[in-house]
Amino acid sequence: MYTIFITGTAGSGKSTLTGAFSDWLRSQEQSTLIVNLDPAAISTPYEADIDIREMVDYERIMTTRKLGPNAALIASIREVVRHVEELVEEIDSHEVDYVLVDTPGQLELFAFRKEGRILAKSIGKYGKKLMFFLLDPMFCTVTRNFVASMFLASSIYLTFQLPMIQVVNKIDAVPRKRIENLESWSESIDSLIVEIENRSKGMLMHFSKEMAQAVHDIVSSIPMALVSSVTMEGFPELHAMITRVVGEGEIELR
Ligand SMILES: Nc1nc2c(ncn2[C@@H]2O[C@H](COP(=O)(O)OP(=O)(O)OP(=O)(O)O)[C@@H](O)[C@H]2O)c(=O)[nH]1
Ligand SMILES: [Mg+2]
């Protein structure tokens, strides 16, 4: 069994990918379980099998405790962590090939708070675990945003210490050339540096180069998959990558 935590910046397509990848896996006769960990999701593009919105009422927390939207999110996740054994028991009661865990829109809530680490540690204890970090090409095909994404990816990688795949989603929505640029920046620090030099100047150029050089070694060890959650392009390659990053041979698709 694989447990995949689907993380990424707000709006990068975590929920859409969760639903679409589950549909694709099922079409390949792999069983899946979808877990929604976003307490504030108003609707999801999939039918969650396990949903923390049934454990915690984000809106009620916001009104009764007079909290703002982000403080209410933190309080909601804390509440979930208080009942983490129940959640884990429910997940473990299903025997499936893949558990797909959709994480909250606010990346820092899951990635940079101890509640996220507790959840990632507790869920999927007995199988193999990994993490998807979604990149939105609408955002990260701009060089300085790409460097910021590298920083985020490496910091999440170091925090969770789980095998990770950087998943560039929405490739259907941007010109192929921009996706090719992304690929070449991730493969070669030299091409990224040249691009930074061409696209920026002064302090911005200087710091972007320093940042890129600082994290490039970490990020270049995290494989990158190119997918569209709308057309499902790239899903077979992403699937093959899962088995590779968790250090096992290829699983033959039935
Ligand atoms: N063209 C295209 N649009 C996509 C793709 N994946 C997601 N989207 C769109 O991107 C928007 C955000 O998608 P979500 O799945 O809600 O993203 P999210 O990361 O779960 O968002 P939050 O949980 O709010 O942070 C929606 O309008 C999706 O339809 C894709 O592969 N291609
Ligand atoms: Mg979402």
Image (cartoon, rainbow, N blue to C red):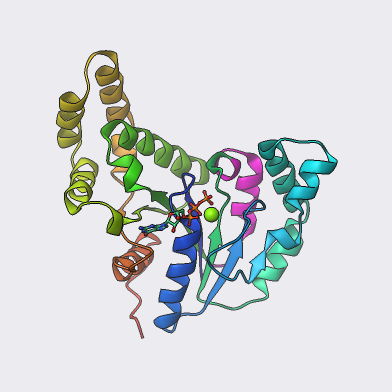
Query: Which residue is rendered at x = 37% and y = 65% of the image?
Result: 230
Q: Is residue 37 magenta?
A: no
Toward which corner of the image does residue 248 lie, by quadrant?
Answer: bottom left
Query: Which residue is rendered at x = 20% and y = 45% of the image?
Result: 187
Q: Nearer the viewer, residue 28 or 179?
A: 179
Left or right of residue 166, residue 90 in this image: right
Q: Position of residue 148 (x, y in %)?
A: 37, 33
Residue 2 vertical placement versus 71 (above, below): below
Q: Which residues are magenta?
A: 109-127
Toward which corner of the image does residue 87 lie, by quadrant?
Answer: bottom right
Q: Nearer the viewer, residue 152 or 123?
A: 152
Viewer can see residue 124: no
Query: Which residue is rendered at x = 28% and y = 59% of the image?
Result: 172
- In the image, ligand 1 is in what quadrant? bottom left
Q: Looking at the magenta stretch, what is its main secondary structure? A: helix
Q: Nearer the viewer, residue 43 or 194?
A: 43
Q: Position of residue 94 (x, y in %)?
A: 63, 77
Query: Which residue is rendered at x = 36% and y = 86% of the image?
Result: 254
Q: Is residue 119 magenta?
A: yes
Viewer can see residue 194: yes
Toward which corner of the image does residue 126 lie, by quadrant?
Answer: bottom right
